[in-house]
Image (spheres, rainbow, N blue to C red):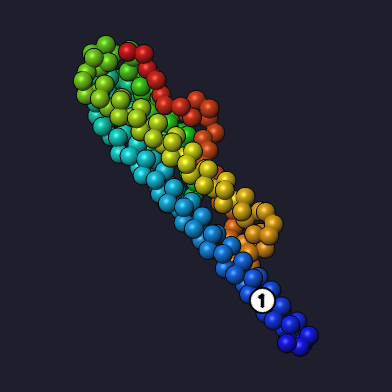
Amino acid sequence: MTPGQVATSALVGAALVVLLSVVVMYNRFVRQRALVDESWGQTDVELTRRHELIPNLVATVRGYAEHERAVLEALTRAREQARAHKDDGPHQREPFEDDLGRAVAGVLVRAEAYPDLKASAGFLALQDELTNTEDRIAAARRFYNGNVRAYNTRVSTFPSNLIASVFSFRPRDFFELADSAARTAPTVDL
């Protein structure tokens, strides 16, 4: 082999290594983006579950506490606003989900004043479902945010940030609740 052929072979080999590296990094971005999308889907499922439990809570409490109409109407409004923003991104949904969590907690706390309601098997089962759903929302949110953190780190670090900019991979929003009280499942001492 002549020195020119060796140099050409080395350049071709280097080009292949670079091309292979780009393909590997691109595919990793695609996998991570899909994981972020999937984990947001799971979070959305749990948020939707909470939205669907609200009418049952309203109906159960309404029978016992008709004069708490304002609290129940606030809960219903918060649910409708949260559902109206179902297709929004995580960051845009945060305030509406915060409001809904506070409204649910408010209804559960108000139920304390009604001994018959607190003893109702239907209310107790519904309260347990809501608590479990809040726990699942928290777990899904942690999983989603962990995937977003890994993806955003890849988008921001060298050399993968070069691939991210060329192929338009953009950072994703975290899903955080602003109200620290809404970060935990509502609790009621029964």
Residue under numbered circle 1: 13
Give residue 149's position: percent from left, percent from top.
57, 46
- In which image quadrant can residue 174 be found? top right
Give the percent coordinates (x, y) of residue 169.
58, 60
Furthest residue toward front: 1
For residue 49, side relative to residue 88 (left or right)? left
At label 1, the amino acid type is Gly
Dot 1 crowding, Cα within 10 Å, few <14, some 14–19, many 20+: few
x and y, in percent, of residue 104 in the image: 38, 28
Using the image, determine if residue 33 lies above or below residue 129.
below
Give the secondary structure at mark 1.
helix
What is the quadrant of the C terminus in the image?
top left
Work out whether residue 42 or residue 159 is closer to the camera in this orientation and state it. Answer: 159
Instruction: From this view, report whether residue 50 is shown above or below residue 172.
Output: above
Which residue sits furthest right? Answer: 3
Residue 108 as seen in the image, left or right of residue 181: left
**Is residue 170 depicted above or below 58 in this figure?**
below
Picture coordinates of residue 103, whole percent (x, y): 41, 29
Identify the image quadrant of the N terminus.
Answer: bottom right
